[in-house]
Image (tube, rainbow, N blue to C red):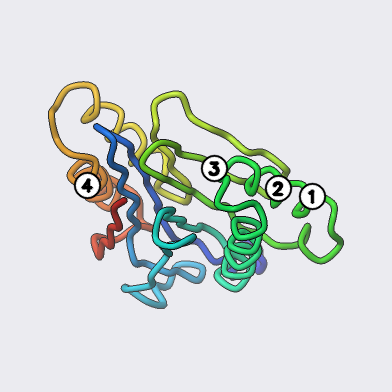
């Protein structure tokens, strides 16, 4: 393993689900540096725009917080119009010399919409109302899709159970789960 790979910060599974007019977004709490767990209870979610929007992040924490701050500014500038704010943030992220160096992803939910915003300029609205980012995202996504299709669990319950499954599989995900709802 190269020295750079050993120092790569890997952490986070963030999952958001919309069901029956309600949304939940949650994350685990693990932060890892190389093969060492640095912290078990990192908070990776944040309420935005008067509590109507929940955002979660994966990637470098300082970069993600910077992006969340910028996204919140865009939400205010565009009166809470989620898609417009997301597209403007993605555009700035790709074109601004400072922002384009930031390494993070954002998962965002409201009661009606779920989006993923990436540093490559992508604004993705999944068809099934499920967003997942981070190291254990594909495990959580698979679990959430199955639970959404085959159970009557609430959005919050689906997020919780799916993150628990991801924590059992992904070494960069733990079971210190924090969930927000709108």
Dot 1 and dot 2 residues touching (CB under 8 Å):
yes
Which residue is identified by label 3?
Answer: 116
Q: Secondary structure under badge 3? A: strand
Task: Give above or below for 49 relative to 110.
Answer: below
Q: CA distance from mark 3 to mark 1?
A: 15 Å
Residue that appears at 28% across and 35% down: 21
Q: Secondary structure under badge 2? A: helix
* Earlier residue among tags 4 and 3: 3
Q: CA distance from mark 4 to mark 3?
A: 19 Å
* Earlier residue among tags 1 and 4: 1
Mark 4: few, some, or many residues within 10 Å (few <14, many ≥20)? many
49, 35: nearer the viewer: 49
Residue 110: x and y in percent read 41, 45
Dot 1 and dot 4 residues touching (CB under 8 Å):
no
Residue 98: x and y in percent read 81, 66
Residue 103: x and y in percent read 66, 59
Residue that appears at 35% across and 57% down: 27
Question: Which label belongs to residue 24?
Answer: none
Q: CA distance from mark 3 to mark 2?
A: 10 Å
Which residue is identified by label 4?
Answer: 156
Q: Which residue is outermost to the left?
A: 152
Label count reads 4
Which residue is identified by label 1?
Answer: 94
Task: Give above or below for 145 relative to 87.
Answer: above
* Earlier residue among tags 2 and 4: 2
Q: CA distance from mark 1 to mark 2?
A: 6 Å
Q: CA distance from mark 2 to mark 4?
A: 28 Å
* Earlier residue among tags 3 and 1: 1
* Earlier residue among tags 3 and 2: 2
Which residue is identified by label 2?
Answer: 90
């Amino acid at each position: 393993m190269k020295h750079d790979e050993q120092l790569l910060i890997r952490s986070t599974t963030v999952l958001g689900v919309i069901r029956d007019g309600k949304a939940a977004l949650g994350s685990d709490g693990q932060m890892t540096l190389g093969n060492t767990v640095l912290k078990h209870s990192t908070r990776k979610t944040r309420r935005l725009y008067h509590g109507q929007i929940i955002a979660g992040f994966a990637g470098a924490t300082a970069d993600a917080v910077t992006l969340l701050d910028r996204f919140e500014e865009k939400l205010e500038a565009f009166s809470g119009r989620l898609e417009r704010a997301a597209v403007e943030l993605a555009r700035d992220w790709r074109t601004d010399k400072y922002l384009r160096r930031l390494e993070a992803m954002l998962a965002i939910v409201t009661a009606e919409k779920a989006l993923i915003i990436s540093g490559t300029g992508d604004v993705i609205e999944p068809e099934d109302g499920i967003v997942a980012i981070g190291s254990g995202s594909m495990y959580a996504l698979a679990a959430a899709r199955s639970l959404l299709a085959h159970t009557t669990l609430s959005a919050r319950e689906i997020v919780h159970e799916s993150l628990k499954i991801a924590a059992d599989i992904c070494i960069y995900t733990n079971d210190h789960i924090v969930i927000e709802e709108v």
